[in-house]
Image (spheres, helix red, strand yellow):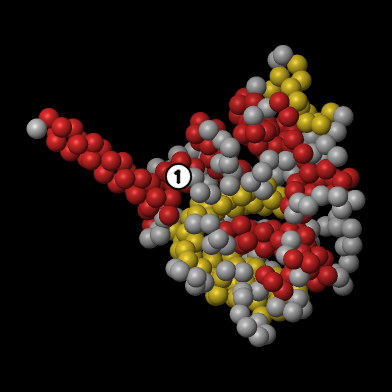
Amino acid sequence: MKVHGIKLKEFSAFERVEISFSPGLNVFIGANATGKSHLMKLMYSMLKVMEPKLKRPSHVDKPLRLKEKLSAVFMPDKGEIGRLVRRARGRKKASIQLDLGDWTSHVDLTNFARLKFQWLGPQLPKRSIFIPSREALSMFDGFIAAYDAQKLSFDETYYDLCVALSAKPLRGRRAEAIASLLKPLEGLLGGTVVLEGGRFHVHAKDGLIEAHLLAEGFRKIAGLAHLIGNGSLMKNGFLFWDEPEANLNPKLVTRIANALRTLAHGGVQVFIATHDYLLSHELSLAIEYQTKPKAPTRFFAFHRRDSGPVSIQAGDTLAELEDNPILEEFAAHYDREHALFAGKVAEAEGGRQ
């Protein structure tokens, strides 16, 4: 099962948009405050409440579960999810339709927090994972208990991620099936990721290295490796990752690009939001030159003019997008550098006269 597309009306920064997704890798680019993270959190919340093994699995209270999930994931003031409706005076209603092929999920939400939720389909067999921009391994110890006790002010994507990280590693044939994906990440880390005594370590040649002693970029790699190793990221599952490039040096960014394509190639539907030139262009080049592992990919440019609603362009490569703020700023940087260099040359020539 894959997310084929979504229709949004009056939600967050969006007035009216309709998007068709790739079954493999979907890359969101755009300036800050253009709704990239909001769209991923919305889809994640809707998919998450359709999973089995929930605390309250009956069909009767799905609207309540979604209402609670949106409140916990977006964290609006006083939990008022009506604030997710696009701002305007008077009564306003947002509508969302999530298309999963043979089934659809539909939400109506008013700015007075009245919510209707229809899910015409079975429970989803695989889980959805949301990885925030801040890594979770270093905060894992005691996080779940503290969150349950309402002592932490983190949105619920961090809690859900820690729950997923707490799962035990796969064994036997299931472990063999993910070995090819796990091995390159463990090679980067120089060992395997283990959870011992409630804390994460990397089991390297020289012994156990605490996650807290690893650079943050390596902790992100270790977290991804553990999610693969314990079966949280498997075929027909969903991965949402906000700024995977955060705190990674360029060498690790290219490895993450390869890992994302490998996950998508293996049947995980991946959604990422990025501001990084290298990551986005690595993924685009892989499509342009059909490098392996091959994974269907689409790029989406989120664009807002002045204070108006956000529009979204889609393309199979970055070259097909008219609005690319990452490339535009790099071009502006080159122009500034050229102007500074030209000024230095003119100053030097003036001094010789």
At label 1, the amino acid type is Tyr
* Residue at (75, 16) in percent of width and height: 207
* Residue at (83, 43) in percent of width and height: 143
Q: Quadrant of the N terminus?
A: bottom right
Residue 88's place in the image compared with 289, above or below, is below
Q: Quadrant of the C terminus?
A: top left
The spot of residue 211 in percent (x, y) is 73, 29
Going by the image, does 110 lie left or right of 298? right
Name the foreground residue: 273 vs 138: 138
Query: Which quadrant of the figure has residue 118?
Result: bottom right
Q: Which secondary structure, mark 1? A: helix
The spot of residue 94 in percent (x, y) is 65, 77
* Residue at (63, 61) in percent of width and height: 38
Going by the image, does 94 lie left or right of 294? right
Residue 190 is at least partly visible in this image: yes
Q: Which residue is mark 1?
A: 277
The spot of residue 107 in percent (x, y) is 70, 74
* Residue at (38, 52) in percent of width and height: 328
Residue 120 is at least partly visible in this image: no
Disc 1 crowd, CA 10 A, few/some/many (<14, 14-19, 20+): some
Outermost left residue:
353
Name the foreground residue: 36 vs 281: 36
Going by the image, does 325 lie left or right of 271? left
The spot of residue 73 in percent (x, y) is 73, 59
